[in-house]
Image (tube, rainbow, N blue to C red):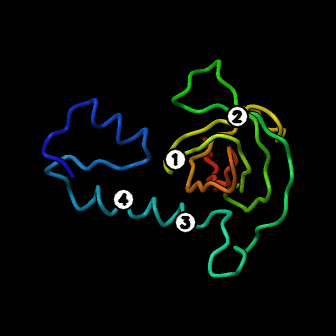
Amino acid sequence: MSGYSGEELAAQCEESGFKLFKKPFTYEELSGWLRECEEQSDLSRQLGGRKIKGRYDFRQDIEYQLNTAGPDKKFLGFTVNKSPGGLGLHIFNPLHAGQKIKIISGLGVPDLKGIVVWCSKVGENTYSAGLRLCSS
């Protein structure tokens, strides 16, 4: 929450995967954000030792772009599992929760968009991430 809501601060928050609420904010804004968080929590990550219903192993090499890196910058990785609303990824650069990415090849669907739900380091220059797929 901030009483200071300059565009630079808002952009930094969004790029880092944070939600900035500009004062005064409404209950509807807060509850909408909480609904989004609940939708994102169903992704490709093992919780409490149990797999998410509908998730299955799925290995596919992918090429993707980040919303902040520019259209010419491409990254490589691969999927490790898939659920009805998301993908588990193995990648070679860190991502941040809330970051938008576009999978440009490897899944047979051109320009498939998603939002990073979580990312954790698993080795030197290797990361696991959960991606919620977007319908648009």
Single out the mark in the foreground, 3 or 4. Answer: 3
State which tag comes first along the sequence, 2 or 3: 3
Considering the numbered disc 1 on the image, is that residue within a helix, a strand or a loop?
loop
Q: Distance between the residues labelled 1 and 2?
A: 15 Å
Residue found at x 77% / y 59%: 82
Residue that mark 3 sits on:
41
Q: Quadrant of residue 16?
A: top left
Q: In this view, does 122 lie above or below 77?
A: below
State which tag comes first along the sequence, 1 or 4: 4
Considering the numbered disc 4 on the image, is that residue within a helix, a strand or a loop?
helix
Q: In this view, does 30 lie above or below 19?
A: below
Residue found at x 69% / y 81%: 49
Q: Which mark is residue 32?
A: 4
Q: Residue 64 carries which label?
A: 2
Asked if residue 30 lies left or right of residue 15, the reply is left
Q: In which quarter of the image is residue 111?
A: top right
Q: Distance between the residues labelled 1 and 3?
A: 15 Å
Q: How far apart are marks 4 and 2 (CA)?
A: 28 Å
Residue found at x 71% / y 56%: 88
State which tag comes first along the sequence, 1 or 3: 3
Q: At label 4, which amino acid type do we have? A: Gly
Q: Which mark is residue 126?
A: none
Q: In this view, does 46 lie above or below 63?
A: below
Residue that mark 1 sits on:
96
Residue 38 percent location from the top left of the image: 48, 66
**64 and 122: which is toward the camera:** 122
Residue found at x 56% / y 26%: 69
| CB atoms of marks 1 and 2 within 8 Å | no
| CB atoms of marks 4 and 2 within 8 Å | no
Residue 102 percent location from the top left of the image: 65, 35
Crowding at label 1, few (<14), some or many (≥20) Cα neighbours within 10 Å? Answer: some
Crowding at label 4, few (<14), some or many (≥20) Cα neighbours within 10 Å? Answer: few
